[in-house]
Image (tube, coloured by chain):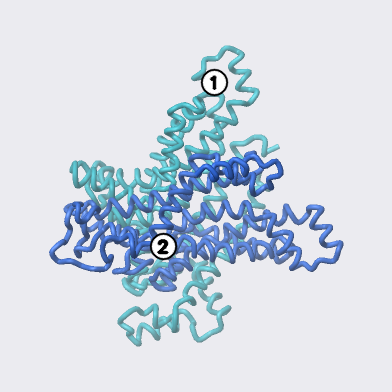
Chain colours: A blue, B cyan
């Protein structure tokens, strides 16, 4: 413990700390952001170790335990098929985190790639990409995701694709704006002068310099994606029953509010805590990585 | 002003053109023959043949788009395969319910966010300010459909004060209408109020440190006059225009809220259409929403231009 504190202190006071270290130090000092990070880590561990942590099989129905109130045997109560709500909430973490991470990865790959082309190439290509991006942004995010999920068919995979594609235009716009700012810097001009290929300039010089705002946006986008997946599952367009997902659990729970309110409380609370954690972490990262906040 | 409006209007044309291509392209995401998929489970050969002819599916993609777009420009968004009614009629039938919900939600959002944002800015770092920040973050992180379910649990199931679901037209019974709309409007308004409160706070903080506010204080004006008359009036300009942009969020949120409270609006129309595989209705709703959202953006820009004299010069 002592050596950890010493290492942390040395890390915090290193005079030659680079920008990433300075940002990490600033993030570490932000108690609220650290609380967000710890909550995210908690949910990640829940998702990874769900088979060992969950007290029951999330799919095992028990006709003798239908809609039982929270008790020592079932801390969060049971659902309409006698399944343990706590176990389903724990396993549901997997669907939510997977949807959050995979759909943002889709947005990132698409958005950063297309945004870099638009910003770097410019001209007609930029004009065309910008107009297409505007068209995507003209459709409210969830409505576009619902339409895409509807046409692709209801499943968790399609929901992730729908969310990823719907959120990609934000990354296109962000990346394009960053690239336009960075590409006029002297070091890019120098790289061009020494004969670097456009691909090398993009990958080795532009990409590392636009990473910070993209990381911040990704964290906030995961929060939005978790809510979007829960929304699509709530509407029946995401994870399909009987597989556990917080959104689909709420969809079922709304039919049993009179006699089993606990079915609605826990999955919603889990969504709220995970999204709040990502929002707090995203805000902290923005404060730490944005030079205007230093 | 007029030139700005025309310039802005011209930029809308390619955007709306790409929107229409995007929405037209949706039907080609369907696996297999779009006509068969759109015909639904019955697979009635007459319906499939009618759809194939109506959508010109035997022609090339650009020609199909041309026919579809020509129809859209005439106000023909297609026909519902379930009800056989024109999609535009269905949308116009449901739209007033969602517009009422959106207006009430925006009213609630403004009533919560502006006073909360002003007090937070006037007393930065105070307990109230911290409380308002927590409220804003919670509002942004809470899924509105869950908040809806929790409110039904409290106000309908436990207390029995408000109806859990259903809709009564204001022309039939205004009291019953408000009773059925107050919870959904509050649920939708909370998320928006979180965003607007943050912006009111930052906008007020900026204005309160301006020279003319210091001058107003130096003249000996009372604090309420300085805050409400001199600062708030200027701080509200970006907040009001942002409010117009948030109407897009309201339309998205309405889909979920209408589902929770069983309100027969625009959002419920798209979800019912999704499960009935009524793809023409889905396309129509997305097209109308995107067009409305784009026009609202234009109006927000115009409002900002009108309210901000510095832009005019």
Counting from the top left corner in percent of width and height, residue A189 is at 82, 57
> Between residues B156 and A261, which one lies in front from this camera angle?
A261
Counting from the top left corner in percent of width and height, residue B20 is at 54, 67
Tell me what residue is drawn at x 61 percent, y 26 percent.
B209
Tell me the subunit letter for badge 1: B
Counting from the top left corner in percent of width and height, residue A30 is at 53, 40
Q: Secondary structure at mark 1?
A: helix
Residue A231 visible in the displayed image: no
Counting from the top left corner in percent of width and height, residue A236 is at 34, 65
Total residue callouts:
2
Quarter that holds the C terminus of chain A: top right
> Between residues A52 and B216, which one lies in front from this camera angle?
A52
Is residue B156 depicted above or below A51 in this figure?
above
- Relative horizontal placement of residue A51, taking residue B25 as reference (left or right): left
In the current view of this chain or complex, which residue is farthest to the right?
A193
In the current view of this chain or complex, which residue is farthest to the front?
A2
Q: Secondary structure at mark 2?
A: helix
Foreground: disc 1 or disc 2: 2
Density class for disc 1 (Cα within 10 Å; few <14, some 14-19, many ≥20) is some
- Relative horizontal placement of residue B75, taking residue A174 as reference (left or right): left
> Between residues B76 and A103, which one lies in front from this camera angle?
A103
In the current view of this chain or complex, which residue is farthest to the top?
B220
Residue that badge 2 annotates: A48
> Between residues B272 and A146, which one lies in front from this camera angle?
A146
């Amino acid at each position: 413990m002592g050596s950890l504190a010493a290492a942390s202190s040395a890390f915090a006071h290193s005079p030659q700390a680079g920008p990433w270290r300075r940002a990490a130090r600033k993030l570490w000092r932000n108690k609220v952001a650290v609380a967000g990070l710890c909550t995210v880590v908690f949910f990640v561990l829940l998702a990874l170790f769900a088979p060992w942590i969950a007290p029951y099989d999330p799919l095992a129905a028990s006709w003798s335990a239908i809609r039982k109130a929270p008790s020592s045997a079932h801390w969060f109560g049971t659902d309409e098929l006698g399944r343990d709500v706590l176990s389903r909430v724990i396993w549901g973490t997997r669907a939510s985190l997977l949807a959050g991470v995979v759909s943002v990865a889709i947005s990132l790959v698409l958005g950063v790639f297309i945004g870099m082309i638009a910003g770097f190439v410019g001209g007609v290509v930029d004009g065309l990409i910008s107009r297409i991006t505007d068209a995507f942004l003209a459709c409210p995010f969830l409505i576009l995701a619902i339409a895409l999920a509807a046409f692709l068919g209801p499943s968790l995979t399609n929901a992730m694709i729908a969310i990823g594609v719907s959120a990609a235009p934000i990354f296109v716009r962000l990346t394009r704006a960053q690239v336009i700012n960075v590409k006029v810097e002297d070091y890019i001009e120098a790289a061009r002068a020494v004969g670097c290929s456009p691909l090398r300039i993009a990958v080795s010089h532009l990409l590392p310099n636009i990473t910070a705002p993209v990381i911040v946006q990704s964290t906030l986008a995961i929060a939005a994606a978790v809510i979007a997946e829960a929304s699509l599952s709530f509407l029946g367009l995401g994870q399909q029953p009987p597989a556990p997902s917080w959104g689909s659990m709420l969809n079922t729970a709304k039919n049993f509010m009179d006699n089993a309110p606990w079915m609605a409380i826990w999955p919603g609370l889990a969504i709220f805590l995970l999204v709040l954690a990502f929002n707090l972490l995203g805000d902290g990262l923005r404060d730490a990585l944005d030079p205007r906040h230093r | 002003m007029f030139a700005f409006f025309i310039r802005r209007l011209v930029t809308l044309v390619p955007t709306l053109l790409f929107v229409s291509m995007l929405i037209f392209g949706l039907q080609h995401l369907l696996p297999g023959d779009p006509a068969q998929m759109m015909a639904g489970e019955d697979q009635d050969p007459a319906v499939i043949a009618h759809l194939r002819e109506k959508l010109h599916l035997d022609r090339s993609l650009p020609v199909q788009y041309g026919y579809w777009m020509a129809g859209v420009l005439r106000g023909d968004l297609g026909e519902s395969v379930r009800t056989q009614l024109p999609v535009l009629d269905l949308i116009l039938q449901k739209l007033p319910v969602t517009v009422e919900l959106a207006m009430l939600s925006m009213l609630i959002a403004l009533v919560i966010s502006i006073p909360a944002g002003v007090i937070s800015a006037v007393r930065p770092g105070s307990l109230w300010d911290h409380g308002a920040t927590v409220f804003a973050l919670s509002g942004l992180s809470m899924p509105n459909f869950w908040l809806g379910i929790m409110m039904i649990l409290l106000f309908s199931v436990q207390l029995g004060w408000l109806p859990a679901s259903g809709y009564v037209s204001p022309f039939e019974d205004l009291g019953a209408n408000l009773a059925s709309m107050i919870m959904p409007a509050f649920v939708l308004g909370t998320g928006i109020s979180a965003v607007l409160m943050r912006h009111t706070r930052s906008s007020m903080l900026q204005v309160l440190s301006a020279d003319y506010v210091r001058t107003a204080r130096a003249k000996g004006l009372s604090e309420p006059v300085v805050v409400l008359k001199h600062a708030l009036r200027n701080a509200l300009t970006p907040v009001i225009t942002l409010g117009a942009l948030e109407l897009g969020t309201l339309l998205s949120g309405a889909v979920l809220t209408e589902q929770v409270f069983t309100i027969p609006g625009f959002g419920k129309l798209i979800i019912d259409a999704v499960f009935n595989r009524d793809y023409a209705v889905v396309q129509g709703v997305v097209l109308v929403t995107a067009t409305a959202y784009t026009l609202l953006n234009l109006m927000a820009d115009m409002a900002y231009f009108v309210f901000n004299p510095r832009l005019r010069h």
